[in-house]
Image (cartoon, rainbow, N blue to C red):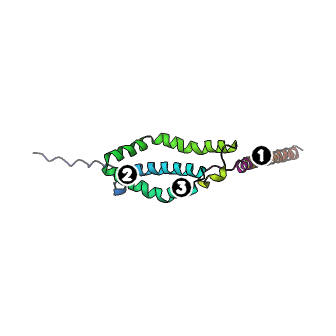
């Protein structure tokens, strides 16, 4: 029986090293925990808007531990797991709500419907006067940059024209 030359080995398939933190069960647990934390953040914001600062602080102080433990319970309790999975499956919509809420709150503040002093700084909602001054300052800065660029171009044009006339003479 003839001996055939060895075929070159196929390149090793690229595999992703799975660490305990990246295991599917852990990722699911983290998604569940994040969903509970997101809802807690929304509840804390509502509490702060109502002036219930102690409640908002309580959620901020104890919410992450609660979310972690609830996610652990969901690993062994199918009903809790199903409920938390429902929250994580609506993730894109929760994301849309999360990013649009500050914008809508800012509109409400701009029109005197909510008091920004009752919102935590991390809400992203500014006092309308601060926002107005910020926008005006940005517009003035942009205008000043344009005027400076125009002046520089006018000077450059004048220099070219002057140098051109010298060469022609």
Residue 138, position in %: x, y?
A: 73, 48
Label 3 Cα crowd, 10 Å radius (few <14 / some 14-19 / many 20+) = some
Q: Contact, CB < 8 Å: mark 3 with mark 1?
A: no
Residue toward you, 113 or 27 = 113
Badge 3 or badge 1: first in the primary sequence:
3
- In the picture provided, is 122 more to the left or to the right than 155? left
Queried whether the magenta region covers residue 159, the answer comes back as no
Which residue bears the numbered disc 1?
143
Residue 104, position in %: x, y?
A: 61, 41
Which residue does the image show at 9% across and 45% down from the upper left?
Answer: 1
- Magenta stretch: give its range: 123-134
Residue toward you, 17 or 137 = 137
Which residue bears the numbered disc 2?
29
Which residue does the image show at 40% across and 49% down from the upper left?
Answer: 32
Residue toward you, 16 or 153 = 16
Q: Contact, CB < 8 Å: mark 2 with mark 3?
A: no
Which residue bears the numbered disc 3?
55
Queried whether the magenta region covers residue 124, the answer comes back as yes
Viewer can see residue 147: yes
Badge 2 or badge 3: first in the primary sequence:
2
């Amino acid at each position: 029986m003839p001996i055939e030359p060895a075929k070159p080995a196929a390149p090793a398939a690229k595999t992703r090293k799975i660490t305990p933190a990246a295991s599917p069960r852990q990722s699911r647990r983290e998604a569940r925990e994040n969903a509970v934390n997101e809802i807690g953040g929304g509840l804390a914001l509502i509490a702060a808007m109502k002036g219930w600062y102690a409640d908002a602080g309580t959620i901020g102080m104890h919410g992450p531990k609660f979310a972690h433990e609830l996610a652990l319970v969901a690993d062994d309790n199918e009903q809790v797991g199903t409920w938390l999975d429902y929250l994580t499956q609506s993730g894109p919509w929760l994301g849309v709500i999360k990013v649009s809420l500050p914008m809508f709150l800012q509109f409400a503040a701009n029109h005197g419907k909510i008091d920004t002093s009752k919102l935590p700084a991390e809400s992203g909602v500014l006092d309308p006067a601060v926002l107005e001054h910020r926008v005006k300052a940005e517009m003035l800065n942009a205008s000043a940059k344009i005027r400076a660029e125009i002046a520089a171009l006018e000077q450059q044009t004048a220099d070219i024209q002057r140098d051109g006339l010298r060469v022609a003479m």
